[in-house]
Amino acid sequence: MDPEAARTARESLDLAFHISNILNTGIDRHTLSVLIALCDMGVNPEALAAVVKELRQEPPSSEAIISKNSPSLTRPT
């Protein structure tokens, strides 16, 4: 990617992140960049928004709670 395109992409992400913060979405910059990349790849934005909403409503799995509370535990392979 040429420097001008990289600068434009960075500025676009900054603007989208600023709008996201104004709307109080709670989406971090990295997640927002992934969502934008998925849209750029042709994923339906409305379907993507529905998935994000659904994932936010799901309670954390017991495995996620265990790994969060016990960082020394590792998942068996």
Image (cartoon, helix red, strand yellow):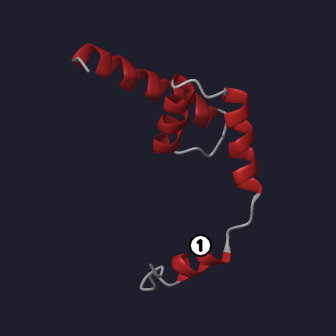
Query: Label 1 is placed on what type of residue?
Result: Ala
Q: Which of 44 and 64 lies nearest the eye of the viewer? A: 44
- Eyeballing the image, is 40 above or below 58? above
Q: Looking at the figure, which quarter contains the C terminus? A: bottom left
Q: Position of residue 17 (x, y in %)?
A: 52, 33
Rendered view: 24 above or below 10: below
- Answer with left or right where residue 1 lies relative to residue 43: left
Q: Secondary structure at mark 1?
A: helix
Q: Is the residue marked by circle 1 packed among few (<14), some (14-19), or many (20+) residues within 10 Å? A: few
Residue 39 % position (x, y): 57, 27
Quadrant hosting residue 61: bottom right
Residue farthest along the top direction in this orientation: 4
Q: Residue at x 49, y 30 (%)?
A: 37
Which residue is drawn at the image coordinates 61% and 76% (left, top)?
63
Q: Position of residue 14 (x, y in %)?
A: 44, 28
Residue at the extreme left of the image, as rendered: 3
The residue identified by callout 1 is 64
In the image, residue 15 sits, relative to residue 48, either above or below, namely above
Work out whether 30 lies above or below 61. above
Total numbered circles: 1
Q: Left of 69 or right of it: where is 4?
A: left
Tell me residue 31's x, y (percent).
Answer: 52, 43
Residue positioned 30% across, 22% down in the render: 6
Image quadrant holding the N terminus, namely top left
Residue, x 74% and y 45% (percent of image)?
A: 53
